[in-house]
Amino acid sequence: MAIKSPTKISIIVPTLNEEEAVGKVMEKIRKHVPNGEVIVVDSSDDNTFEEAMSNGAVAIREPRLGYGHAIRRGLSMASGDILLFIDGDDSYDPSDIPKVIGPILEGKADVSLGTRFHSKPEGMTAMRYVGNLAINSIFSTLFGKRVTDSQTGLKAMTRCAYEKLDLKEDGMTFSTEVLLKSLERKLRVREVQVGYKTRVGSSKLSPTRDGARILFYMFREWFR
C-alpha cells in the first residue's frame, strides 16, 4: 500500500556508515511514499552520503555523532505536515510507513509509534530483546502509560505536535524524550505493529552503554 494523501510527509533517515543499505531504503520509501520529502542526515565516513543523493534524497552532512543530533537536524530542515523518522539500516520496512502514519491521517493520533514487540523481532538479539522489554516496563511503571516499544526507530508526528515538544536530547535518549514529552503535553500517542528484521551491516548501538543512558534519563526525568 502506498500513501496517496495530499498531506505533505517528510521522512527523516539518520545514517552512520550505511552505504550498503541506504539505496535499498530509498527505493522502498519511494515505492510506498512516492511524493514524500526524504531527508538523509549522514554522519558517515563511507559513501552513504553519495548513495543517498544518487537515490533521490536530500542529503545533509551532520558532523556531530548521535541519533538525536541527526533527527533534530533533519526536523529543522523538514517542511512536511507529518514528520516521520525511519532508520537507514533496512531493519524497518518502509512498507509499514502507511500503517504508522494511518492514525495521524485519520485524526486519531498526534504521535504514532511503530512497535516491534508483538513477538520477538527477527532481527534482534536475545540480549537486546530482554533489555528493551525491561526499559519498556520501567518506562510504563514510572510514567503511568503502558508502552510496548519506547525505543522504536520508526515513528511519526504532526508538525503541531513537534512544535510542542522542544526536543533537546542528542543521543539514543532522544526516542525516550519524544515519548515522555508527548505524554507530558497530553498528546494522543498510538502504537501500531510493524516488522523488524536483521539490519544490513554492523550495529552502532551499544546495549550496555546506551541502555544505561536511557535508564538514567528516565529516572532523572521522573525525579524532576
Image (cartoon, helix red, strand yellow):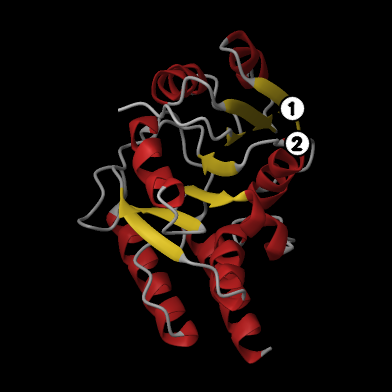
The quarter of the picture where residue 84 lies is: top right
Q: Say whether disc 1 or disc 2 marks the residue closer to the N-terminus.
A: 1
Please give the label number shown on residue 60: 1
Can you see residue 92? Answer: no
Q: Is residue 91 left or right of residue 160?
A: left
The mark found on residue 222 in the picture is none
Name the residue: 57% across, 68% down: 182
Kind of element beneath mark 1? strand
Give the number of the mark in front: 1 or 2.
Answer: 2
- Outermost residue toward the left in this view: 119
Q: Label 1 vs label 2: CA separation?
A: 9 Å
When the figure is inspected, residue 146 is found, relative to residue 92, above or below; the finding is below
Q: Which kind of residue does numbered mark 1 sit on?
A: Ile
Please give the count of numbered marks on the rendered protein: 2
Amino acid identity at mark 2 = Met
Along the line of sight, which residue is nearer the eye, 36 or 71?
36
Residue placed under numbered mark 2 in the picture: 77
> Mark 1 touching mark 2, by CB under 8 A?
yes
Tell me if residue 29 comes above or below residue 14 in the rendering: above
Residue shown at 34%/31% (left/top)? 95
Classify residue 57 by image quadrant: top right
Of residues 68 and 115, the one drawn nearer to the viewer in this rendering: 115
Residue at the spot x=76%, y=35% of the render? 62
Question: Quadrant of the image for the N terminus?
Answer: top left
**Where does the image place residue 6, in percent across and percent down from the top left?**
52, 30
Near mark 2 (Cα within 10 A), the count class, few <14, some 14-19 or many ≥20, is few
| Residue sitting farthest toward the top | 54
**SS class, disc 2:** helix
- Quadrant containing the C terminus in the rendered view: bottom right
Residue 50 locus on image (x, y percent): 66, 13
Residue 19: tell me if it is visible: yes
